[in-house]
């Protein structure tokens, strides 16, 4: 891209020129019958059911452009929505994206954001099929994801039963550690800081859990205690987590936590945005998953080593 093109703002280019640039040359999977450019997209629903979820990212609340590149933000926007579909035992197939930004935003930044979205979506065979572009006082990204259950029943929050194993696939505490490092201006621990900017979703493992008979499942977006708490509440059961089973996660974040005066257990148990999957199983857990606790009789509560946890309980939106 020439320097003069990189200097063009959204106002210089206009809505439809920007949209044309964002969709030009994109290749969709076979399930997309009509992609961007018409009044609406058309996608197939071979299962006869569609899994749908929506999430938003607001600049200054969910990301900072002095920490993240637009490409990072795009990947994160897709990943966190795809994780919700994974947590139902489905596969994300297509996305609709609405983007609000100041008129002074560089067109090149919008293209970089789109490239990040496409990079993440293509990594598991999905695509972006439509959306909207509007003027806003800051960056706001709203993503709707569609998913396919491929004949499976959805795995809900309310199916956990006493005696089920609680297992997780993916990392815990890394994003939370990365956040406190960024917030405190510490430039060490590159992997952890990167984990906060772009989550590593265990794509495909939601379906593996469903096939293995998972009775309940969620993704760890607000923090392990908070999200397991949703399972406990919906299922009217208790969950007892084991710190010994989570020791590996603790050890990974311990040095970073010490550098900023944080409790590493607070990051593992209360840090969010790793988008690991946690599920309950009445039998053996799938390959790649690790058992971290057990479902016990109600009342609905989450325990750590048999006792209530008094530290951070996770993310709160308000």
Image (spheres, grey):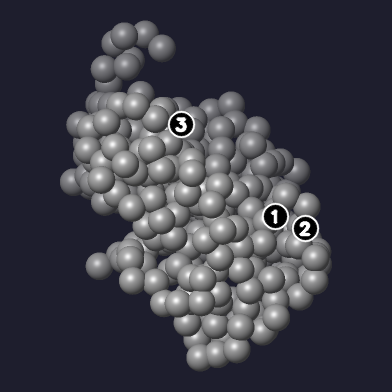
**Residue 118 in the figure: left or right of residue 136:** right
Cα–Cα gap, marks 1 and 3: 22 Å
The residue where tag 2 is placed is: 286
Residue bearing mark 3 = 191
**Residue placed under numbered mark 1 in the picture:** 289
Q: Position of residue 46 (x, y in %)?
A: 78, 61
| Badge 1 vs badge 2, beta-carbon distance below 8 Å | yes
> Where residue 32 appears, x then y in whole percent?
68, 47
Cα–Cα span, label 1 and label 2? 6 Å
Q: Is residue 186 above or below residue 271?
A: above
What label sits on residue 198 in the rendered view?
Answer: none
Vertically, is 165 above or below 36?
A: below
- The mark nearer the N terminus, 1 or 3, is 3
Residue count near mark 2 (Cα–Cα under 10 Å), binned few <14, some 14–19, many ≥20: many
Regarding mark 1 in the picture, which secondary structure is present there? Answer: loop
Mark 1 and mark 3 residues within 8 Å of each other at the beta carbon: no
**Residue 43 in view of the camera:** no
Does label 3 or label 2 sit earlier along the sequence? Answer: 3
11, 38: nearer the viewer: 11
Q: Is residue 33 left or right of residue 108?
A: right
124 sits left or right of 104 in the view:
right
Position of the C terminus, as image quadrant, is bottom left
Picture coordinates of residue 215, whole percent (x, y): 70, 75
Relative depth, front residue between 260 and 32: 260
- Kindly indicate the quadrant of the structure image that contains residue 162: bottom right
């Amino acid at each position: 891209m020439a320097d003069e093109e990189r200097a063009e703002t959204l106002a210089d280019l206009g809505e439809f020129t920007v949209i044309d640039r964002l969709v030009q040359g994109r290749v969709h999977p076979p399930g997309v019958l009509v992609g961007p450019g018409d009044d609406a997209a058309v996608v197939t629903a071979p299962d006869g059911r569609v899994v749908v979820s929506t999430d938003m990212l607001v600049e200054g609340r969910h990301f900072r452009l002095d920490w993240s590149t637009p490409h990072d933000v795009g990947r994160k926007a897709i990943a966190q929505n795809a994780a919700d579909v994974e947590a139902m035992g489905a596969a994300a197939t297509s996305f609709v994206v609405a983007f609000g930004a100041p008129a002074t935003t560089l067109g090149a930044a919008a293209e970089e954001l789109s490239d990040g979205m496409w990079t993440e979506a293509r990594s598991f065979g999905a695509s972006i099929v439509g959306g909207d572009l509007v003027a806003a006082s800051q960056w706001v990204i709203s993503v709707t994801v569609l998913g396919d259950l491929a004949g499976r029943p959805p795995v809900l929050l309310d199916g956990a039963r006493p005696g089920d194993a609680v297992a997780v696939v993916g990392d815990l505490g890394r994003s939370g550690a990365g956040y406190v490092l960024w917030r405190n201006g510490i430039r060490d621990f590159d992997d952890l800081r990167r984990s906060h900017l772009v989550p590593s979703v265990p794509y495909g493992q939601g379906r593996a859990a469903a096939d293995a008979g998972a009775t309940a499942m969620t993704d760890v977006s607000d923090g392990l205690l908070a999200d397991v708490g949703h399972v406990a509440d919906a299922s009217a059961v208790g969950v007892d987590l084991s710190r010994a089973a989570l020791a590996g996660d603790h050890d990974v974040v311990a040095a970073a936590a010490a550098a900023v005066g944080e409790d590493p257990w607070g990051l593992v148990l209360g840090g969010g945005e790793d988008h690991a999957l946690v599920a309950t199983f009445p039998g053996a857990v799938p390959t790649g998953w690790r058992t971290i606790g057990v479902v016990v009789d109600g009342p609905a509560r989450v325990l750590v080593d048999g006792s209530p946890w008094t530290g951070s309980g996770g993310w709160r939106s308000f």
